Every structure is written in structure tokens, then in C-alpha cells.
Amino acid sequence: MASLRLFLCCFLFTASSINLVCSRSLQKNHAALFVFGDSLFDPGNNNYVGTIGRANFYPYGETFFKHPTGRFSDGRLISDFIATYANLPLSPPYLQPGNHQFIYGANFASAGAGALSETYQGFVVDLKTQLRYFKKVVKLLRHELGDAEAMAFFSRAVYLFNVGANDYILPLTSNSTVLETFSKQEYVGMVIGNLSETIEGIHKSGGRKFGFLNMGSLGCIPSLKVLVPGNNGSCFEPVNELAKLNDAALPKALEELEIKLAQFKYSMHYLNISFGERLNNPQKYGFKSNIACCGSGPYRGIDSCGGRRVVAEYELCSDPSEYLFFDSGHLSDKANKQIAELMWSGTPEITGPYNLKALFEA
């Protein structure tokens, strides 16, 4: 048995590019981090899918990594900071070729993804597909660790989500007629329903501890403010209206799952508080401005950062740490760190029943 375990510790499962780590080498109560969602958490999965939603070019990544990684920021993402706080390595994109140590978790997030498969269909890894990838990891680790040990591993892990923003932005910024077919409440219900189904799918594989962010003032990001006629500084209220409906429905759905699913625990970070405060008073949190560091037009809200999209010309600030936003729709490394710190050790008023530190220790 000892020789078999030694063999498994060193075994390279080349068919699936998995480099396993011996379970005996893990600290007691080791908890992995599995990440799902959109560009807020995507470390570069979109580098490997046929999509225009990429950030694998300068100036993305210019501060912390010193080169573009595919992250929509000058540096790290919220999920990167959470991994660091949990004493885990930064998880590479799941789709990145090579050997992955899934014993630390995996990141399936894809920029542009939604909870609905129809959102940017064909250009992103939607939530349903992210769940399918996760189930592949489950199958492989069960094969290597055995059912009992794998179940314990997945029950200790934390599952971090940010999804839904693209589902709400796309219908209101394109020629979509979906909101003519469904009421706003029905549409939000579809988004929350798909998220709930994904959570239940993970729970069946052993997942017990989940972290979420709500939408907050989604219509106040520069790329949406620039759509307001007159550019008078107002937020894009049609998106904010859907975000508010989402933020009312999500806690109710999580409370229902808490009753329905055995040992289900969750953290719910209220971006309407943490993000909203920084939007309204950026100087208080060390930011010179709540416009974007990189982009063009009013608020630098035109999605032109790097000159690789529709608009080639763009402006770039000299110090991204002075800005809440790095590009027209994504936070700077500094802002991501501030939000991550609150998610990790914030009070119940801002994190819900548990903060993420408590979930990792549970």
C-alpha cells in the first residue's frame, strides 16, 4: 500500500495534463479554491477560446505581473488575492495547456460569461460549461484519491462565484429582444435559477462552502456611464434596475439553498456597499478618481484599452493605483485588493453569514 501511494504521489496523468500532489503532503484541513464566473475572476481562460473578450496584451498586467496574463486589470484579480490569503498558489486558467495541480483548486472563469448559455454564446465559457469542466476535475481526482478522500477534499474546498453582470448588460446594450419576451423579474429569475442549479451540481460532488458577490451599482461602471445621453455623470439606470432585482433575489435563493442542501454555508459580499462607497468617495479610499485609468472618451469609458478592439486610440494613466478602475469595466489591482480584503475578513454587514476566512476555516 505504501508503494502504491508513493506511485500515486509521483504519477503524471498525461492524458488529462494533471500533475497530482500527494495528499499526505497537504496540511491538515487543507482547503482548495475553485473559481467560477466572468472577467472579474478570469485569469486568462479566454486566451484559449475563440473570443474577442481577451486581455492578453499591453497594458494589461503592467504592474504586478509585468506582462499581460489575460486578466482584465493592471495586476491581480479579487480571486488572486483570496487565494493568497488562503495560502494557496495563484490558480492558472483551467484551459491553459500543461500540468495543473488541481489539489489546490482550479479557475474556470471566462470574461463575458453569464449564467445563461445564450450570453455571448460561442465566444465565452458559459457557467454550464464551467460546471462541466469542474465535473471533469471531480472525476479525475476521485480516480486518483478514491471516493472517500475525494469527497472530503471537495467538502473542505471553497467555491467562489461572480456571474450575472453580462446577462444583465448584454440585453440592454445590444439588439436583443429577450426583455420583450420575459419580464425583468422573470429574466432575473432565469439567471438566479441557473446559478442555483450550478450550486446544486457542485454540492452533489461534495461542495459545501460557497462565496458570492452581488451586483451592486453595475450601471455605474465607466463603459455604461458613457451610454447615458449628455454624459452628465449619471449611471446607466436600466442596468442598475436589473442589478437591484438580482441583489434582492440572490439572498433569498441562497437562504432557500441553505435549507435544501445539507451543510451548505455561504458568504455573500455586498458590492453595493463596498463598491458603492468607493464610487461615491474615491479619495477616502486612496483613489484620485473613479474614471478609468485606460480607455478613451468620457470617463475613459470607451472599451479601447490596448488599442486591440474597435477603437484603436486610447489614453493610459501613469499610475493605475490612483484609479478605482483600470479599464472601462474592470477594477485596478489596488481596488481588487481592497474588495478582497473585505470579502476575506469583513463583518457580517458586508459579507453575509460568513466571511471567506471563516469559510476556509470551517
Image: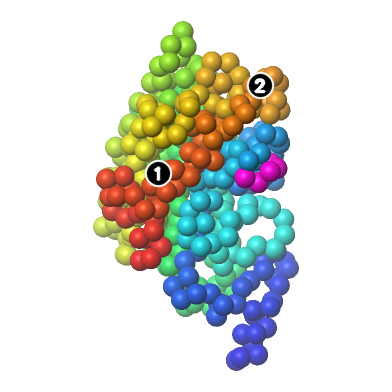
Location of the N terminus by quadrant is: bottom right
Instruction: Look at the image and tell me in which quarter the C terminus lies.
Output: bottom left
From where the camera sits, is residue 326 visible?
Answer: yes
Q: Earlier in the sequence, mark 1 or mark 2?
A: 1
- Tell me which segment is drawn in magenta: 64-68
Residue 134: say if magenta. Answer: no
Principal secondary structure, stretch drawn in magenta:
loop
Give the quadrant of residue 110.
top right
Q: Is residue 65 magenta?
A: yes
Amino acid marked by disc 1: Leu
Q: Which residue is mark 1?
A: 213
Whole-percent x, y for residue 72 in the image: 59, 38
- Residue 199: quarter of image: bottom left
Residue 112: percent from left, percent from top: 56, 36
Residue in front for this viewpoint, 193 or 350: 350
Depth check: give the residue in front, 131 or 277.
277
Disc 1, SS: strand
Q: Amino acid at mark 2?
A: Tyr
Residue under label 2: 314
Callout 1: few (<14), some (14-19), or many (20+) C-alpha neighbours within 10 Å?
Answer: some
67 versus 171 height, above or below: below
Residue 267 got which mark? none
* Front: mark 1 or 2: 2
Q: Position of residue 11 (x, y in %)?
A: 69, 76
Tell whether label 2 touches label 1 (CB within 8 Å).
no
282 relative to 107, above or below: above
Q: Is residue 139 visible?
A: no
Seen at 50% across and 24% down, the residue is 291
Q: CA distance from mark 1 to mark 2?
A: 30 Å
Question: Against 119, is 93 above or below?
Answer: below
- The residue sitting at 52% across, 31% down in the picture is 322
